[in-house]
Image (cartoon, rainbow, N blue to C red):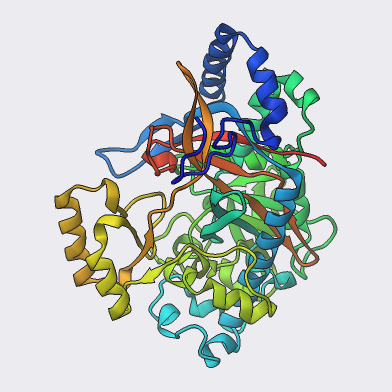
């Protein structure tokens, strides 16, 4: 199961010996009876079914609800390694927030020629409504998910930034709860940093971003599109865990310059709205006039300092993969430092030389839509058929600005539990970051997504990937 020259195994060294971080886990694993482990494997699956941890898959004949596969072998990260990662994550998140402020104010980075203006002028995620406005506390990116991949002992790369409405934290929390209930002795044996206090930390961070109009303790609500949204389980879970109200657009209305929430005592003011509704549907008076998911007039209240919206409208620019390709310049421009966490090498197909290279090497590259997500609309060259490559070539040639390309990385592997024992599978990692005016709070661990199919590099749940608990060890 150890790593080979073209992939890094996080548990085993090339000679078959166990890496230090996994030492205690491996000792425990070897003490367990195979029948017990198989039973625990089925218990975990049953637990997820009972809890209702599912997601909806779209794009087929109709929305289909599926169980997210859970693997009971934890991913283990050493304390020193995590400290290095957090420094790079914090640097990147600070740069993202500064970039958002600059983009909606003086645009110094564009004046300096570090980022081309065309990247956001034609970008639907850039909102003219936000120009000249500073959100409460100066925070745009309240909750951020930074997707990381590993290729070697000290080689971590940022695969993409999620600053609009990053999802997946409920799976991180449920994974941990499941592991603690099944293997309490393991947590006694190994010092693992906790993640269960994330909802409390989220509530505290959001309250710290309350608007000037707040009186007394800030009231926080989670705005969901409703039960048919693919992440509805997470919306309800987080609201419950935070002690916040779960609301839909019809539960809110603008009253006397504030956003009011329907209660048994009439409409009560809401101070902070953790929205899980896309920008275009937030306010039918400012964006999509046909939206029934948002609150008419909320943008006027927002700009007048009457409510905080997290994440701020317009932060979707940070999720743009063309903008991502400029993140090394963005980090250096706003922090004065070289990025501690590098990007994956990226070719911008909007540039003729890059496009020519990508067209010549489609069979070796991963090509993604600039605004794509969830593993959809992409080409993985090494596993694509000749017909798929030919189809994608036509797409590239007709609309090159819509795509970027990256090399096919040899993602690190972690073991999963199979009928035949432990087997390596490719993984990525999404740490969750909370930003308030005075702090950047990074939850120790995050969501590890794992490709359940042997040899597969696609970890997205919508494409058959699963999840596993991420253990950051204490010093």
Q: From the viewer's perspective, is 125 left or right of 354?
A: right
Q: Quadrant of the C terminus?
A: top right
Q: Is residue 282 above or below residue 443?
A: below
All told, the count of numbered labels is 0
Could you tell me residue 16's position as x and y percent?
57, 30
Q: Is residue 466 in sight in this rendering? A: yes
Q: From the viewer's perspective, is 255 left or right of 281?
A: right
Q: Is residue 286 in sight in this rendering? A: no
Could you tell me residue 180's position as x and y percent?
70, 24
Q: Is residue 444 above or below residue 233?
A: below
Relative to the observer, which residue lies in front, 348 or 245?
348
Q: From the viewer's perspective, is 300 left or right of 198?
A: left
For residue 143, what is the image quadrant?
Answer: bottom right
Q: From the viewer's perspective, is 136 left or right of 385?
A: right
Q: Tell me what residue is drawn at x 64 percent, y 31 percent.
A: 18
Could you tell me residue 318's position as x and y percent?
52, 68
Q: Tell me what residue is drawn at x 62 percent, y 78 percent.
A: 332
Relative to the observer, which residue lies in front, 260 or 471?
471
For residue 162, what is the image quadrant?
Answer: bottom right
Residue most extreme to the front: 15
Residue most extreme to the bottom: 111
Could you tell me residue 181's position as x and y percent?
69, 20
Relative to the observer, which residue lies in front, 77 or 240?
77
Relative to the observer, which residue lies in front, 271 or 192?
192
């Amino acid at each position: 199961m150890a790593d080979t020259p073209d992939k890094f195994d996080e548990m085993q060294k090339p000679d078959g010996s166990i890496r230090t971080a996994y030492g205690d886990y491996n000792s425990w694993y070897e003490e367990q009876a195979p029948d017990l482990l198989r039973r625990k494997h089925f218990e975990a699956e049953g637990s997820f079914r009972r809890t209702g941890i599912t997601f909806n898959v779209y794009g087929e004949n109709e929305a289909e609800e599926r169980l997210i596969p859970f693997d009971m072998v934890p991913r283990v990260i050493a304390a020193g390694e995590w400290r290095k990662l957090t420094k790079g994550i914090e640097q990147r998140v600070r740069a993202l927030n500064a970039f958002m402020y600059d983009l909606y104010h003086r645009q110094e980075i564009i004046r300096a020629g570090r980022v081309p203006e065309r990247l956001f002028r034609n970008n639907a995620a850039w909102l003219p409504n936000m120009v000249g406005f500073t959100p409460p506390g100066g925070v745009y990116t309240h909750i951020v998910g930074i997707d990381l991949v590993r290729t070697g002992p000290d080689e971590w790369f940022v695969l993409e930034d999620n600053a609009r409405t990053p999802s997946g934290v409920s799976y991180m929390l449920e994974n941990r709860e499941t592991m603690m209930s099944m293997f309490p002795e393991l947590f006694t044996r190994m010092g693992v940093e906790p993640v269960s206090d994330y909802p409390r930390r989220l509530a505290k961070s959001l309250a710290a971003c309350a608007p000037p109009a707040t009186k007394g303790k800030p009231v926080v609500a989670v705005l969901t599109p409703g039960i048919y949204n693919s992440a509805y389980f997470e919306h309800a879970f987080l609201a419950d865990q935070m002690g916040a109200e779960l609301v839909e657009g019809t539960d809110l209305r603008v009253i006397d310059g504030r956003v009011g929430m329907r209660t048994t005592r009439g409409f009560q003011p809401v101070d902070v709205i953790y929205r899980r509704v896309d920008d275009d549907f937030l306010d039918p008076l400012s964006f999509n006039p046909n939206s029934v998911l948002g609150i008419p007039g909320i943008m006027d209240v927002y700009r007048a300092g009457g409510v905080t919206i997290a994440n701020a409208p317009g932060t979707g620019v940070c999720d743009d993969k063309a903008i991502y390709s400029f993140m090394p310049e963005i980090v250096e421009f706003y922090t004065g430092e070289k990025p501690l966490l590098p990007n994956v090498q990226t070719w911008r197909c909007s540039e003729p030389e890059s496009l020519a290279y990508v067209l010549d090497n489609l069979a070796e590259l991963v090509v993604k839509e600039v605004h794509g997500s969830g593993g959809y609309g992409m080409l993985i060259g090494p596993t694509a058929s000749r017909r798929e490559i030919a189809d994608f070539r036509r797409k590239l040639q007709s609309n090159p600005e819509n795509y970027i390309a990256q090399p096919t990385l040899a993602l690190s592997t972690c073991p999963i539990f199979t009928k035949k024992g432990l087997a390596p599978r490719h993984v990525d990692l999404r740490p969750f970051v909370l930003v308030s005016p005075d702090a950047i709070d990074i939850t120790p661990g995050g969501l590890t997504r794992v490709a359940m199919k042997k040899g597969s590099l696609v970890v997205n749940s919508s494409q058959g990937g699963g999840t596993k608990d991420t253990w950051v060890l204490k010093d």
